[in-house]
Amino acid sequence: MTLLRDVSVLWSLFHILILFMMLYRSRYPQKKTFLLTAVTMGPLVFLNVAGVSFFGAELMGKVFVLTCTLPSLLFFWFVSKDKKGRFFFTFCLADTVALWIMAVTNVADFYFGGQQYILMFIGRLVLFPLAEWGAVHYLRKPYMELQNSVAEGWGVFAGMTGLYYILLAVNSNFPAIITERPQELPAFLLILLLMPMTYATMFMAMYRQLLLYRKQQGERVLQEQKNTLEAQLENQQHIRKMKHDMKGYTVTLSGLLAAGKTKEAVEYLKGVETEMDILPRQFCVNPYLNAVFTHYYGKLEELGAECRMDIQIGDEEQPYMELCQILSNGLENACEALRELDEEQREISLQMKYSRNHLIIRIRNRCRDDLHVERGEIPATGKESPDHGFGLVTIQEAAERLGGEMLCYTENGNYVLDVMILCDFFRKEKS
């Protein structure tokens, strides 16, 4: 019957990998990640199962941390995009959940299954897929969102999960396997009960943090829409005033010319030209987008930034709500980055143009020398300010709604935000 035990160990080790891979963020594409995992972790899993067969479960349980946990920790640390609290929390979470299932099924088989390993095998056969089902349906999406949005505060959670893993590992196997220490079984069962309750508390705290993040993000989006509409209204008022004033200018010029006062008419035109120069700049025909450009051009001027804008769009129909979100968040983040620099370093360029069947937006601004963002990475917020960094997620979501994508990275002391939108997508949506 030891075959069932060995197969259940093999099943458990493979599902530890599956559970972890559902929750962590690899720095490589999916195909390469699976290939590296299979090549590295496959032999490690089989060696540990072979060790159970040759040396017994008790001995391998005592050295499991050295033969499996530490090697897999080093491998996944190398592959993972995250290197600190987020990674260690995710790794310890997957390992602790798996160790909990293995401990529960082991104790249940010893006391209720006659140590025939049948109950152990069936329990692990059911509980591991059940845990993965719960992770996919209830945990993975909000957990990934939380990893993308929050960079601080993971160390405490990682420390708690690491201590729980050590606590379970030690109590399960030292000084002997727990089934050989019946006097310590009540305390061990209390640990097994306490662990899911602690994890439930931790995830409730994380979920509240996620809800707070979503609320703050939604408030920021609404504020941006409010600012855009107010700026657009201000633009319209300027246009109405200009039309009204033009009537007066025309009447005055007509009177001067009719009276033959050419010199006075020329002087008057110079005065009109000077007054026109103080009106808001016109970056594009679309009033909503122009309101965004005007608003942030003013903010950049206040910062003393050197600003270059290359807007090559006409009066064609555009999804201005999403584009306003993309531009507002991108330019707001650029202003925040430039504010941290000395005034002589503050440079920014904005390009918005069509390239074949795509609308391309690129915002490039100077940034801190110590800032490093890989292509395809979305840097999480690391500041105390509740809205810093939230804009990138909003930009990505807005681009995806238009069938496009977002890419950000740093190069040569600049932070670059690229957004590419498929024109056919929003044209079909509008038609």
Image: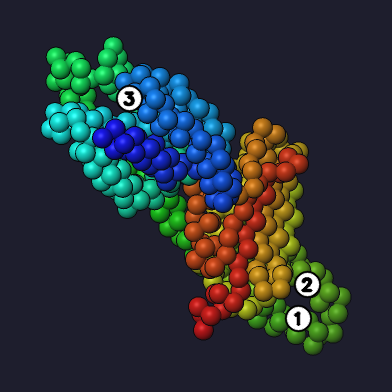
Q: Is residue 235 visible?
A: no
Q: Quadrant of the N terminus?
A: top left
With respect to residue 88, does 240 lie above or below?
below
- Give the labeled residue for mark 1: 253
Of the residues under marks 3 and 1, which one precedes in the sequence? 3
- Give the labeled residue for mark 3: 57
Image location of residue 3, percent across then percent down: 31, 36
Q: Is residue 307 left or right of residue 158?
A: right
Identity of the residue drawn at 47% across and 30% down = 47
- Where disc 3 sits, the SS reads helix
Foreground label between 3 and 1? 3
Image location of residue 216, percent across then percent down: 40, 48
Q: Nearer the viewer, residue 62 or 271?
A: 62
Dot 1 and dot 2 residues touching (CB under 8 Å)? yes
- Mark 3 neighbour density, 10 Å: few (under 14) some (14–19) many (20 or more): some
Task: Give the residue at the far bottom of this rendering.
Answer: 258
- Where disc 1 sits, the SS reads helix
Q: Nearer the viewer, residue 24 or 75?
A: 75
- Give the labeled residue for mark 2: 268
Q: CA distance from mark 3 to mark 1?
A: 101 Å
Q: Which three-letter amino acid code belongs to the residue tagged 3? A: Ala
Of the residues under marks 2 and 3, which one precedes in the sequence? 3
Q: Which three-letter amino acid code belongs to the residue tagged 2? A: Tyr
